[in-house]
Amino acid sequence: MKGQALVAGGFCLLAVSTMAQTRVEVTAPRPVYEAILKLQSLSRVAINYEDLRYDSANDVEDASGWILTPQQRQDHPNAKVIIPKAGSLSATLPTDGAGKLPDVSTTEQALAAVLAAQSASNTPGTLHSELAGGVLFVEPSEQHSAQGFRVSATPILDTLVTLDGKEALAVDVFEYIVAQIRNASGAKLTLGTVPIGAFLQSKVALKANGESAKFVLAKLLAALFPGRTAFYHALYDPVLQVYVFNVAVKLE
């Protein structure tokens, strides 16, 4: 058996492996997201993630005291760093003898264990997963309203989008998808940390006719990084009220 603990940015992730399973314990502002990062490190199956929307004041906290340095607090005494309130979850993952998630089935089982643990915890909202084209998608099911009531969530990346199939720069295709999401839902989505060279220099030709944005975005990543495991994380900023779209490519 082997164990590894990581403490950074105010959260703790503990992973303990045995011959047939890995126990993951997370305490973080976005515990499902952090657990998914662990799953992704064990699997070659892309796991795409859309964050909960943190509309309730009870679901966020001021982290200025431990994120800002003393000098930053002195220079900006009124500055606040508002982040999702930390929560905890623990789950047992069905890894193989090497501590990996070797295929789609085990990765899907591991993700289901994480989401079940989150649902049973005291973290805000719930999320669900969907498998399509050998790729996993995680998105909100329920969240808290501004008044603190639990309500159904409408994932912004379920917005139906259309593309004409003409070749265009990847960044322009992304922006066209974003414009359709904004027009349909009012939600704001912006590029965050992405392989910028690929987005600015590579051209793709994608066609979609009333297809969920999440599937089209997954196709965009597959076109940009053929044969590799590329995935997105759309993280919600509760202050700016914008989703930040981050992309990573797994190092094989």
Image (cartoon, rainbow, N blue to C red):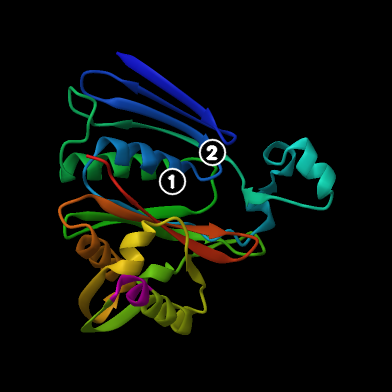
Q: Given the current orientation, which residue lies at the most extreme top position?
A: 1
User: From the image, which quarter does the C terminus lie in?
Assistant: top left
Dividing the picture into quadrants, the one containing residue 73 is: top right
How crowded pointer 1 is (Cα within 10 Å; few <14, some 14-19, many 20+) is rated as many
- Residue 221, percent from left and from top: 27, 61
Query: Which residue type carries mark 2?
Result: Ala
Which circle marks residue 214 in the picture?
A: none
Give the prevailing secondary structure in the magenta stretch.
helix
Answer left or right for 56 relative to 2. Answer: right
Answer left or right for 83 relative to 133. Answer: right
Of mark 2 and mark 1, the one earlier in the sequence is: 2
Report the Cα–Cα distance between label 2 and label 1: 9 Å
Magenta highlight range: 169-174
Dividing the picture into quadrants, the one containing residue 63 is: top right
Q: Is residue 214 magenta?
A: no
Q: In percent of the image, x 23 and y 31: which residue is there? A: 94
Which residue in the structure is indicated by mark 1? 33
From this view, report whether residue 71 is shown above or below residue 12: below
From this view, report whether residue 185 is shown above or below residue 153: below
Q: Are marks 2 and 1 in contact (CB under 8 Å)?
A: yes
Q: In percent of the image, x 77 and y 52: which residue is there? A: 79
Query: Which residue type carries mark 1?
Result: Tyr
Q: In percent of the image, x 62 and y 45: which residue is there? A: 85
From this view, report whether residue 190 is shown above or below residue 173: above
